[in-house]
Image (spheres, rainbow, N blue to C red):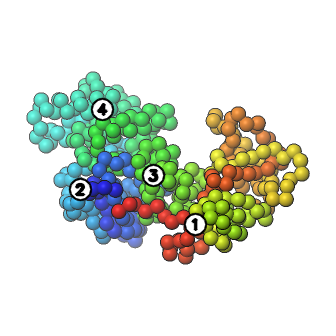
């Protein structure tokens, strides 16, 4: 990351009574970046946004905005604005009154208010809606107005806490495209919270995977997806298969592993012998009908479940001698396999990833793929 971070968190921890919501969070957000905090319910995402906005003071640690320590500065004196999951508009005011509210409080002249509200409504594609009341708006329009209300202040940092969570999928997809455009056009730094990995991948420059109040991994969508730093990140992002294997031998990036008493190949840099986790994305698994005697090193199994998903079939396969069922995705053009059918299972060696299976190796920096740290 070049230049000064727009947002920097230094060792931010937060406790509510005896609940630890955040543990020693360290994070840099670059100017103009769209960074997503992704993690399960209760992992501390909202708490972190509230601390950056100044609605909550961290128990320990510091918050810096453009290099300035703002830990003790109240919310209204920070260059941040927040959009909430379910925004409430003032019912007695029309759209103009709601969007202009902050400007009016700040004493911005009436003519400038009108110009800036018009600009903000244009950004969210609702020009001409000034005189609507909140009960005359759809859920998606309401969230757009909430976004306009934050944008009208021209914040350097926009904090968005699951702003699309209450909307149905079709509107969410439209709104995602809209948010990307608004981000490009304003050049502001966006910190976006979601527990939806699909949304995080679609929107972000970088993703912060959070687990139990701590950072699990920071990286681009492709890095987090292709090279997860932990089994948690692998499972949470893209619902990967995580299988226990033994690394038999390593020759450069070519690794032989034992899985379910079969010897298979995996391409992965920096592996070493011993127990490991094999991370296998469902779309990297190839399933074929078993029409003959299986080869000695072939993985075989039985189809337990099949679901059609539009783009293809989703299978659950009980692999022989493997305890967990394997998730697999096949393109819609492939022949559909039926429940109870015998199948062979294979994968492209380069579509896999290995993680150390003993915690010590990871704590020590690990000889296997190291974590994706935020570049300094
Ligand atoms: N005001 C509060 N008082 C006590 N505990 C709180 C308070 N706010 C949050 N917590 C607790 O802190 C932890 C983190 O909560 P937070 O709201 O930040 O999670 P989140 O990641 O935003 O979850 P969600 O995805 O469900 O919105 C949770 O265990 C929660 O119960
Ligand atoms: Mg939350």
* Residue named by callout 4: 123
Is 20 situated above or below 142? Answer: below
**Where is residue 125 shown, x and y percent of the image?**
33, 28
Mark seen at residue 329: none
Q: Residues within 10 Å of mark 2 (few under 14, many from 20)?
A: some
Whether ligand 2 has any atom under 8 Å from the Cβ at mark 4 is answered as no
Which mark is on residue 66? 2
At label 1, counting other C-alpha atoms closer than 10 Å, the crowd grade (few under 14, some 14-19, many 20 or more) is some
Q: CA distance from mark 3 to mark 2?
A: 22 Å
Q: Earlier in the sequence, mark 4 or mark 1?
A: 4
Callouts 3 and 2 close, C-beta under 8 Å: no
Name the foreground residue: 169 vs 9: 9
Residue 23's image quarter?
bottom left
Q: Tags 1 and 3 in contact by the CB under 8 Å rule?
A: no
For marks 2 and 4, the one nearer the N-term is: 2
Secondary-structure class at tag 3: loop
Please name the residue shown 42% across and 35% down the image. 177
Secondary structure under the numbered disc 2 in the rendered image = loop
User: Which tag, 1 or 3, sits closer to the chain's start?
Assistant: 3
Which-is-in-front pick, marks 2 and 4?
2
CA–CA distance between discs 4 and 1? Answer: 47 Å
**Is the residue marked by circle 4 packed among few (<14), some (14-19), or many (20+) residues within 10 Å?**
many
Give the mark nearer the N terminus: 2 vs 1.
Answer: 2
Give the SS element for disc 4: helix
Q: Quadrant of residue 298?
A: bottom right
**Marks 4 and 1: CB-CB under 8 Å?**
no
- In the rendered image of this protein, does residue 325 appear above or below residue 276? above
Question: In 3D space, how far apart are the residues under numbered discs 2 and 4 (Cα atoms)?
Answer: 25 Å
Kindly identify which residue carries mark 3: 220
Quarter placement of the N terminus: bottom left
Quarter of the image that includes the C terminus: bottom left
């Amino acid at each position: 990351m070049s230049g000064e971070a727009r947002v920097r968190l230094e060792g931010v921890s937060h406790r509510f009574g005896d609940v630890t919501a955040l543990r020693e969070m360290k994070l840099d957000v670059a100017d103009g970046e769209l960074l997503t905090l992704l993690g399960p319910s209760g992992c501390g995402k909202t708490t972190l946004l509230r601390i950056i906005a100044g609605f909550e003071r961290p128990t320990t640690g510091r918050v810096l905005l453009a290099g300035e320590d703002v830990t003790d500065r109240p919310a209204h004196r920070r260059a941040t604005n927040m959009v909430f999951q379910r925004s409430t508009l003032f019912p007695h005011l029309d759209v103009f009154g709601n969007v202009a509210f902050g400007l009016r409080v700040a004493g911005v002249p009436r003519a400038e208010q009108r110009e800036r509200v018009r600009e903000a409504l244009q950004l969210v594609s609702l020009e001409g809606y000034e005189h609507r009341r909140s009960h005359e708006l759809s859920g998606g329009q309401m969230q757009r107005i909430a976004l306009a209300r934050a944008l009208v202040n021209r914040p350097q940092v926009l904090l968005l806490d699951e702003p699309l969570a209450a909307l149905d999928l079709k509107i969410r997809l439209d709104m995602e495209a809209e948010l990307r455009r608004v981000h490009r056009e304003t050049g502001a730094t966006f910190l976006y919270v979601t527990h939806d990995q699909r949304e995080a991948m679609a929107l972000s420059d970088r993703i912060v995977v959070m687990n139990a109040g701590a950072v699990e991994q920071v990286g681009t969508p492709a890095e987090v997806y292709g090279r997860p730093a932990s089994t948690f990140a692998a499972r949470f992002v893209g619902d990967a298969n995580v299988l226990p294997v033994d690394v038999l031998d390593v020759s450069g990036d070519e690794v032989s592993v034992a899985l379910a008493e079969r010897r298979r190949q995996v391409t992965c840099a920096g592996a070493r012998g011993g127990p490991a986790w094999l991370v296998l994305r469902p779309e990297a698994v190839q399933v074929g009908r078993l029409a003959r005697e299986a080869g000695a090193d072939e993985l075989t199994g039985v189809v337990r479940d099949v679901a059609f998903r539009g783009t293809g079939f989703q299978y659950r396969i009980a692999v022989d001698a493997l305890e967990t069922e394997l998730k697999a995705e096949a393109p819609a053009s492939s022949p559909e396999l039926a429940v109870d059918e015998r199948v062979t299972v294979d994968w492209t060696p380069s579509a896999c990833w290995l993680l150390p299976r003993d915690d010590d190796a990871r704590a020590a920096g690990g000889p296997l793929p190291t974590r994706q740290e935020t570049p300094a």
